[in-house]
Image: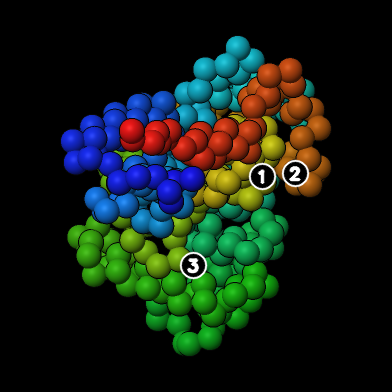
């Protein structure tokens, strides 16, 4: 019993502390960080705190990032890379639904969902905002009503309160969405007046910007998130982006492409790096179409999972192994 351990000699304590340090470094190298804390000299006991009990948000964030990285770099004979799985998924879905083709229309094309508008970057941004929390078909009608009632964005800004909201009422959350749209239009005119010919708000100058700068700028607007920005980049600006909506997110988890604990935003950050650029447009459109048809069930996509059935490794197994490693106690011997 540790509580009956005789008080060790001071020299023994020094060697015990050194041994604890060695043990701590050894465990950390093995991938299971454990903090070993010797208690005051009067006790002679060694107390450890498992890393999974730490409450420091930064530590948790670091571990989550490490976990996401290890999920994609873990070596396994049955593991296929995300790029290979993405190519397989595209091939399977093309056989099922046909090959998606980029349209060049300058109006509303319901077939491409939230990224249907090609007329301008600002039109695409507003169209995508109106698509939030509603269906593609409904948001398409809302945007068409808005453009028919107010052909220019200056007219939207100068309209009487409630008129623009009424035009997009069918899309839901009309008041909230139009407040955000007006704020965006106002900020564009205030910050980049030289880019707005004759006082008409425009975002066409973003075509000359790199992706990261565009993301940083658009994300500064209230109500604009990663999915909205990536839709604008991929559909309208034809940049290599991989938007992640609810369908893509749920299917990616079922396919094993990301851990089950992944959020929609973390899934976007992972897959936007791992999916090959030449597959991003087709894969996004096909996954959305497939998810809508089968209510996010895999169906033919069973053959595009990250791990084969014989060697599939789920995150729960890995986390369980990590927990077991964290529970290993350092041996404490009685001092003679």
Q: Which residue is mark 3?
A: 151
- Please provide percent x and percent y for residue 292: 75, 46
- Please provide percent x and percent y for residue 181: 44, 70
Q: Quadrant of residue 330?
A: top left
Q: Quadrant of residue 297?
A: top right
Q: Residue furthest bottom?
A: 161
- Helix or strand or loop: what does disc 3 sit on? loop
Please state which of the two labelled residues, at mark 1 or mark 3, is closer to the viewer: 1
Judge the density around disc 1: few (<14), some (14-19), many (≥20) Cα neighbours within 10 Å.
many
- Helix or strand or loop: what does disc 2 sit on? loop
Q: Quadrant of the C terminus?
A: top left
User: In the image, is 276 to the left or to the right of 302?
Assistant: left
The reply to whether residue 324 is visible in this rendering is yes
Do the residues under discs 1 and 2 have CB atoms within 8 angstroms?
yes
Q: Is residue 310 above or below residue 30?
A: above
Q: Is residue 27 above or below residue 133?
A: above
The reply to whether residue 235 is visible in this rendering is no
Q: CA distance from mark 3 to mark 2?
A: 37 Å
Residue at image location 63% in from the left, 33% down from the top: 317
Do the residues under discs 3 and 2 have CB atoms within 8 angstroms?
no
Q: Earlier in the sequence, mark 1 or mark 2?
A: 1
- Please provide percent x and percent y for residue 322: 52, 35
Q: Which residue is mark 1?
A: 250
Q: Earlier in the sequence, mark 1 or mark 3?
A: 3
- Helix or strand or loop: what does disc 1 sit on? helix
Q: Which residue is mark 2?
A: 296
Judge the density around disc 2: few (<14), some (14-19), many (≥20) Cα neighbours within 10 Å.
many
- Please provide percent x and percent y for residue 107: 57, 52
User: In the image, is 92 to the left or to the right of 265?
Assistant: right
Residue at image location 38% in from the left, 36% down from the top: 334
Please state which of the two labelled residues, at mark 3 or mark 2, is closer to the viewer: 2
């Amino acid at each position: 019993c540790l509580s009956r351990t005789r008080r060790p000699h001071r020299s023994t304590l020094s060697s015990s502390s050194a041994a604890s340090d060695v043990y701590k470094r050894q465990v950390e190298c093995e991938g299971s960080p454990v903090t070993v804390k010797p208690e005051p000299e009067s006790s002679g006991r060694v107390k450890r705190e498992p890393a999974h009990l730490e409450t420091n948000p930064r530590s948790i964030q670091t571990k989550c990032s490490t976990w996401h990285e290890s999920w994609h770099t873990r070596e396994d004979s049955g593991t296929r890379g995300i790029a290979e799985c993405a190519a397989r998924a595209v091939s399977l879905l093309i056989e099922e639904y046909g090959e998606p083709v980029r349209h060049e229309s300058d109006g509303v094309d319901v077939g491409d969902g939230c990224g249907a508008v090609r007329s301008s970057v600002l039109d695409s941004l507003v169209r995508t905002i109106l698509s939030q929390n509603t269906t593609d078909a409904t948001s398409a009608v809302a945007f068409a009503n808005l453009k028919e009632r107010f052909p220019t964005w200056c007219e939207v800004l100068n309209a009487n309160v409630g008129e623009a909201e009424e035009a997009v009422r069918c899309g839901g959350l009309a008041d909230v969405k139009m407040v955000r749209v007006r704020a965006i239009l106002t900020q564009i005119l205030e910050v980049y007046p030289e880019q707005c010919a004759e006082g008409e708000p425009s975002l066409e100058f973003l075509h000359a910007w790199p992706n990261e700068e565009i993301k940083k700028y658009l994300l500064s607007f209230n109500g604009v998130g990663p999915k909205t920005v990536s839709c604008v980049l991929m559909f309208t600006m034809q940049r290599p982006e991989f938007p992640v909506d609810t369908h893509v997110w749920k299917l990616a988890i079922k396919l094993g492409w990301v851990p089950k604990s992944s959020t929609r935003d973390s899934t976007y950050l992972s897959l936007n790096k791992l999916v090959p650029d030449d597959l991003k447009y087709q894969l996004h459109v096909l996954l959305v179409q497939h998810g809508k048809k089968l209510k996010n069930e895999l169906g033919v996509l069973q053959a595009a999972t990250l791990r084969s059935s014989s060697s599939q490794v789920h995150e729960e197994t890995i986390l369980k192994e990590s927990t077991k490693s964290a529970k290993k106690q350092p041996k404490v011997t009685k001092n003679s």
